[in-house]
Image (cartoon, grey):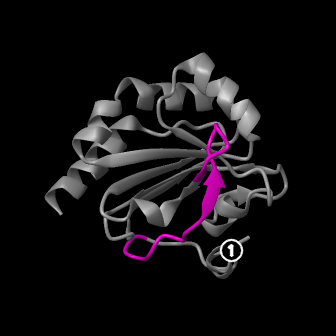
Amino acid sequence: MTAALAAASVHVPEVGETAPDFELPNQFGEPVRLSSFRGQNVVLVFYPFAFSGICTGELCEIRDNLAVFEDASATVLAVSVDSKFSLRAYAVQEGYSFDLLSDFWPHGAAASAYGVFDPDTGMAKRGTFIIDATGQVRYKVVNPRGQARDFQEYRAAIAGLEQG
């Protein structure tokens, strides 16, 4: 765990605050560091598990509407506690062209830094954080277990970035 991640794990980022930095491997094992995206918007999507029904539906909706994010110069990073191996199989099966990041070890550390790790179940909650080009959280939503996120809220939040 990086020092920045350890310090951030105590505080849940709110809208207007700096997003906690992290580095996680993507589905190919390549390291992805959040701070390397400064200068562009990031849509950080935490989800419980690869191959599960609601998660697949949500990520497929993002996949099918990726232009909404690209038009706003926003990069989608999807994070779960699955291993990079499962994430690679999941990305291939579903045709995801965005990075799926593995928060496998230390287990749930990035999700914890964002306040969306559930230690009782060992998985991330459905949390979305839209981070602007300066690294500030501009939008945040955490949905209860079993409740999918509303894609229209993404559209509205992305539109807000374009105006801001």
**48 or 30: nearer the viewer:** 30
Name the amino acid, label 1.
Thr
Horizontally, residue 123 falls left or right of residue 58, namely right
Q: Position of residue 108 (x, y in %)?
A: 74, 57
Q: Which residues are magenta?
A: 15-31
In the figure, 78 relative to 140: above or below?
A: above
In the figure, 112 relative to 18: above or below?
A: above
Magenta highlight on residue 109: no
Check disc 1 and report its element: helix, strand or loop.
loop
Residue at horizontal 24 percent and vertical 57 percent from the top:
161
Residue at horizontal 62 percent and vertical 44 percent from the top:
26
| Residue sticking out furthest to the top | 93
**158 or 120: nearer the viewer:** 158
Q: Within the image, what quadrant is residue 71 found in?
A: top left
Q: Within the image, what quadrant is residue 15 found in?
A: bottom left
In the figure, 73 relative to 1: above or below?
A: above
Q: If the image is split into quadrants, where does the C terminus sit?
A: bottom left
Horizontally, residue 33 falls left or right of residue 108, namely left
Q: Let me know if residue 51 appears in the view.
A: no
Mark 1 nearby-residue class (10 Å; few <14, some 14–19, many ≥20): few
Q: If the image is split into quadrants, where does the N terminus sit?
A: bottom right
Horizontally, residue 13 falls left or right of residue 108, namely left
| Residue sticking out furthest to the left | 163
| Residue sticking out furthest to the right | 120
Residue at horizontal 48 percent and vertical 70 percent from the top:
19
Q: Position of residue 162 (x, y in %)?
A: 18, 54
Q: List the residue tagged with mark 1.
A: 2
Q: Position of residue 158 (x, y in %)?
A: 28, 49
Prevailing secondary structure of the magenta residues: loop
Q: Let me know if residue 90 appears in the view.
A: yes
Magenta highlight on residue 27: yes
Residue at horizontal 77 percent and vertical 50 percent from the top:
104
